[in-house]
Image (spheres, rainbow, N blue to C red):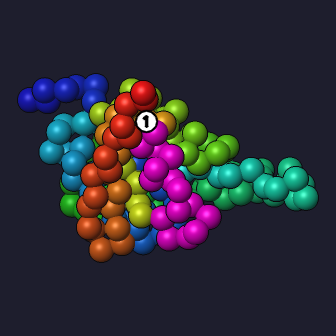
Amino acid sequence: MNEHPHETIVVGVDASSASAAAVRWAAAEADRRGARLHAVHVVEPAHRSRPDQDLRLQLDIARQTVPGRVGDWVFRSGVAVDIAVSVVTGDIAAQLAREAGDAALMVIGAPESLHHSDLPDDLVRACVCPVVMVGSFGDVTSLPAPPPAA
């Protein structure tokens, strides 16, 4: 019987191999805990020099492709968990932290670009729950909480 019937594990997703590993790890952890899995894909707004249509197109594409990708990754992990998939827009760290507001755990894939290299630290500062980072080969790092403010 599930000890935490409303527990949720949030996992940030993109198209990277680290993201696939993070989803598989998070699905296994959700299965172990009897928790729900909430996969969140964040589409960053285009720069001001690009039209709004680019954002709408990116959101449409993500809404069509991300649920199937996440479902495939979970299916391949060999576990059966309750899955929700959200596609949102905004700042990646802020949106993931918002989605993880009541979560038991936030899971991300190790950033594969310099553009997102600060994401793990940003999430540790912004999330109330523990944050775990999973590398492309399934290596798991539990990120330390920031020291309390003086």
Which residue does the image show at 22% across and 53% down from the upper left? 28
Instruction: Decide: few, some or many residues near mark 1? Use Cα within 10 Å; few <14, some 14-19, many ≥20.
Output: many
Compared with 123, 133 (above or below) is below
| Quadrant position of residue 25 | bottom left
Disc 1 marks which amino acid? Cys
Is 43 displayed left or right of 66 in the figure?
right
Which residue, given by chain and number where applicable, does mark 1 sit on? 127
Is 20 displayed left or right of 137 in the figure?
right
Percent x, y for residue 94?
A: 58, 39
Q: Quarter of the image containing the C terminus?
A: top left
Which residue does the image show at 45% across and 53% down from the upper left? 120
Q: Residue furthest left?
A: 1
Is residue 119 located in the magenta-colored stretch of the structure? yes
Q: Nearer the viewer, residue 2 or 18?
A: 18
| Quadrant position of residue 64 | bottom right
Which residue does the image show at 57% across and 40% down from the upper left? 95
Magenta-drawn segment: 111-125
Is 32 displayed left or right of 143 in the figure?
left
Compared with 112, 45 (above or below) is above
Which residue does the image show at 34% across and 67% down from the upper left? 135
Main secondary structure along the magenta-highlighted residues = helix
